[in-house]
Amino acid sequence: MINEYIQRYGRRLYGLCRYLCTSSFEADDLYQETWLRALDNFSKYNPSMEFEPWLTKICVNIYRNSLRRIRRSPIINFLDNKEKDSVIESVNAASGEDYLLLYEAVNSLPDKLRLSVVLFYFRDMNIDETARILGVPTGTVKSRLNKARRLLKEALGDEADV
């Protein structure tokens, strides 16, 4: 049964993991941990609800928890963003357009704003789904998206119509 879900949603989930994580190894770990957690909690899944938002919420929560652990850790993370930049550059942009500046600007946003932008714009989730996944009110999502758009306009200048 879970194999059907993996075949159907695995590719999009992995894309989200690659976007959230700074390295392919972290993305692989997040992807595997998400499926393991989904399997462990499958009895709690309500089949009347859509599966992908439920799975995305699990992924985002695991990601958030890992960020909290990293921030509390006394060990400083010396990794730079070169690998993440190379991943972004290697992403095939739709119709050959160059979205590198946009991806860099989105990556520079604070985590709360970046997660809202990724879920709403890159994962095509509506405000309600985004709010449910992030565990915040819809007004908070709207506010975060508004602030993110303002910051992206400042960062991109006249380069794009955000």
Image (cartoon, grey):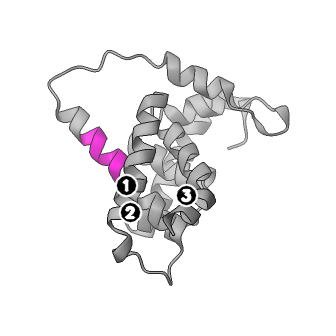
Q: Which residue is mark 1?
A: 36
**In the rendered image, the vertical position of residue 68 relative to residue 62, given as above or below:** above
Q: CA separation, marks 3 and 1?
A: 11 Å
Residue 108 highlighted magenta (yes or no): no
Question: Tag 1: Cα neighbours inside 10 Å, few (<14), some, or many (≥20)?
Answer: few
Q: Which residue is mark 2?
A: 39
Q: Which residues are magenta?
A: 59-68
Residue 135 appears in view: no
**In the rendered image, the vertical position of residue 141 relative to residue 70, given as above or below:** below
Q: Residue at x 14, y 24 (%)?
A: 74
**Residue contact between numbered discs 3 and 2, judged by CB atoms under 8 Å:** no
Q: CA separation, marks 3 and 2?
A: 11 Å
Q: Position of residue 51 (x, y in %)?
A: 52, 70
Q: Which residue is mark 3?
A: 6
**In the rendered image, the vertical position of residue 96 relative to residue 43, given as above or below:** above
Helix, strand or loop under label 3: helix
Name which residue type carries label 3.
Ile
